[in-house]
Image (cartoon, rainbow, N blue to C red):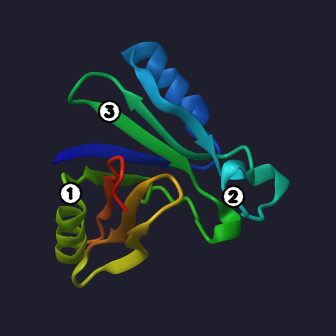
Amino acid sequence: MNLYPYLNFDGKAEEAMLFYQSILGGEFEGGIGYFGEIPGMELPEEEKTRVMHASLRISESVKIMASDTSPSMGHVWIKGNHNYISINADSKEDGERLFKGLSAGGKIEMDFQKTFWGAYFGSFEDQFGIGWMVNYDLKEGEE
């Protein structure tokens, strides 16, 4: 299992991540994804260029991930809600276990479910107000 900081921005994710890269080095895993690339998603024009996900790999064990909020989907950036802990689970079952355990008594934002980007993913605020994201990247041939 790996734990990574996940940062949220209000339209500044790309600028911030490029800045961090210029200082810390590293490469973006899979490029920078934008909300406008989500299949079938209807969004206001100004939100289509907001970052849905960026992952800056700095070393084998260190990466910073980020996204922008999407106001039309009800996301509101408030100082204090702009950090998550992201867990990349070792298996789908491990991801389900971690999601269920850590979210108990908290507020689920997105159930742990299969996504269009080839992973199982879910997010929540735990009972102590900490934001978490649990991800499992599907391996070839997995459903």
The answer to whether the residues at label 1 and label 2 have Cβ atoms under 8 Å apart is no
Decide: few, some or many residues near mark 1? Use Cα within 10 Å; few <14, some 14-19, many ≥20: some
Q: Is residue 138 left or right of residue 30?
A: left
The structure residue drawn at horizontal position 62% and vertical position 71%, both measured from the top left corner, is: 74
How far is the residue under mark 3 from the one under mark 2?
A: 27 Å
The structure residue drawn at horizontal position 37% and vertical position 63%, both measured from the top left corner, is: 143
Q: Disc 1 designates what residue? A: 91
Which element type, helix, strand or loop, lies under badge 3? Answer: strand
| Position in image of residue 124 (x %, y %) | 36, 70
Going by the numbered disc 2, the residue's amino acid type is Pro
Q: Disc 3 designates what residue? A: 63
Going by the numbered disc 3, the residue's amino acid type is Lys
Which element type, helix, strand or loop, lies under badge 2? Answer: loop
Decide: few, some or many residues near mark 2? Use Cα within 10 Å; few <14, some 14-19, many ≥20: few
| Position in image of residue 8 (x %, y %) | 49, 50
Q: Is residue 123 above or below residue 52?
A: below
